[in-house]
């Protein structure tokens, strides 16, 4: 099935800086070197997990729309009932009017119910409240896992725990005895797997994580988006200031110029002197900045591409390479999340149906531009 990549931040700002970046001045772009090459600069990114991500959150659980709770007045068996926090964040129990509990802890909700209920009875009531189901907090686990879907998050959850909820990643190990099932197309690419949080790609090394390195086992937050792409995909991702950001099928001999042409060319105003090619694992990316303007005019050799490369055409120049690579990766994972989230249509989910992109992820869906007519 052909996939078209939605526009996601083709003009992303320089402000996307991942936690834990180095404090020393990062490397900056240099003038072109040999006259026969269009390469302006190269930069190898490194994996830096913020130590705070490895600590469980200290904030207690708070209620939100869709959460189901059981409430009872102690000593009154008939009063026991199960109710749901409404879309407006209000909770209804017995003769009480709607109580606004959105953002309250269970203890605060209990105190509020007791206070309001005491208006109608002589003796101060002793209220019991139990959380029965969570629907206001989710994590998204999609791609090449055994059971992709949306999973409730009732308490602190690590990345490994979330992957376990989805049955683990699809790999040769888990399908060793099921070769006849056609598992080749289902293997997870750990180098391209990612966690998206509030529009940013977290620098988690999934290869190290799956092999037991707990320094990569971060705690998740509500609406975190976890994605495991296919290991057999052979495409080049063309993003940024092009007519149609999209997947371009890889073929032997594909070059930068060919990939840009496959996205129907660049937009007016694109800054062609700093076109980027990102290669390798997302946690350890290698950035090459190319003067595409010189390539277009035949003043420099074209750049050969490999499957999985990310090509990014900016709208403005970038001075610092670590900032530039963060913008590219954030754009890439946001685009991947849009397509992966859309794939949930028709799949069974463990959470609220009908919503396919995390509200807090920072991802916005913008329809792709129609390709120009070919004369």
Image (cartoon, rainbow, N blue to C red):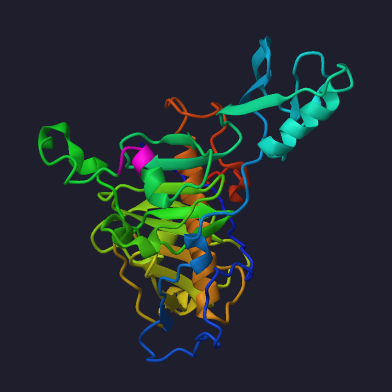
For the record, the magenta segment spans 164-168
> As drawn, which residue projects farthest toward the top?
78
Which residue does the image show at 65% across and 14% down from the upper left?
80
For residue 313, say whether it is visible.
no
In the depicted structure, whether residue 303 falls above or below residue 261: below
**Between 149 and 278, the one nearer to me in the picture:** 149
Give percent across and percent down for residue 134: 56, 31
Q: Answer with the quarter of the image where residue 1 lies.
A: top left
Q: Quadrant of residue 163?
A: top left
Q: Is residue 92 above or below residue 142?
A: above
For residue 47, above or below residue 225: below
Q: Position of residue 280 (x, y in %)?
A: 33, 67
Q: As rendered, which of 147 and 186 lies closer to the eye?
A: 147
> Residue sitting at 59 percent across and 77 percent down?
317
Residue plotted at (16% across, 32% down): 181
* Magenta portion: prevailing SS class: loop
Q: Residue at x 61, y 51 (%)?
A: 362
């Amino acid at each position: 099935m052909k996939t078209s990549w939605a526009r996601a931040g083709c003009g992303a700002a320089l402000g996307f800086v991942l936690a834990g970046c180095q404090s020393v001045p990062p490397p900056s772009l240099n003038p072109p070197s040999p006259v026969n090459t269009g390469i302006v600069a190269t930069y190898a990114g490194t994996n830096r997990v913020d130590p705070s991500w490895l600590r469980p959150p200290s904030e207690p659980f708070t209620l939100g729309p869709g959460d189901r709770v059981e409430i009872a007045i102690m000593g009154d068996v008939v009063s026991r009932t199960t109710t749901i926090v409404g879309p407006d964040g209000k909770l209804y129990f017995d003769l009480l009017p709607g109580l606004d509990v959105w953002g309250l802890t269970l203890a605060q909700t209990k105190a509020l119910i007791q206070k309001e209920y005491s208006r109608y009875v002589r003796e101060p009531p002793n209220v019991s409240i139990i959380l029965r189901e969570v629907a206001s907090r989710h994590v998204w686990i999609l791609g090449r896992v055994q059971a992709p879907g949306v999973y409730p998050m009732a308490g602190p959850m690590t990345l490994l725990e979330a992957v376990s909820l989805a049955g683990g990643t699809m790999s040769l190990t888990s399908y060793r005895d099921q070769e006849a099932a056609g598992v080749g197309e289902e293997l997870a690419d750990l180098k391209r797997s990612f966690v998206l949080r509030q529009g940013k790609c977290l620098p988690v090394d999934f290869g190290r994580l799956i092999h037991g390195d707990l320094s990569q086992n971060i705690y998740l937050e509500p609406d975190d988006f976890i994605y495991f792409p296919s290991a057999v995909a052979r495409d080049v991702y063309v993003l940024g200031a092009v007519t149609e950001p999209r997947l371009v099928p890889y073929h032997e001999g594909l070059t930068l110029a060919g990939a840009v042409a496959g996205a129907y060319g660049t937009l007016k105003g694109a800054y062609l002197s700093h076109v980027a090619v990102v290669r390798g694992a997302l946690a350890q990316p290698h950035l090459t900045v190319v003067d595409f303007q010189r390539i277009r005019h035949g003043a420099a050799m074209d750049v050969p591409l490999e499957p999985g490369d990310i090509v990014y055409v900016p709208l403005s120049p970038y001075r610092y390479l670590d900032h530039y690579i963060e913008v590219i990766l954030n754009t890439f994972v946001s685009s991947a999340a849009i397509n992966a989230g859309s794939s949930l249509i028709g799949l069974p989910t463990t959470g609220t149906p009908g919503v396919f992109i995390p509200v807090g992820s920072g991802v916005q869906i913008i329809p792709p531009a129609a390709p120009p007519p070919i004369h």
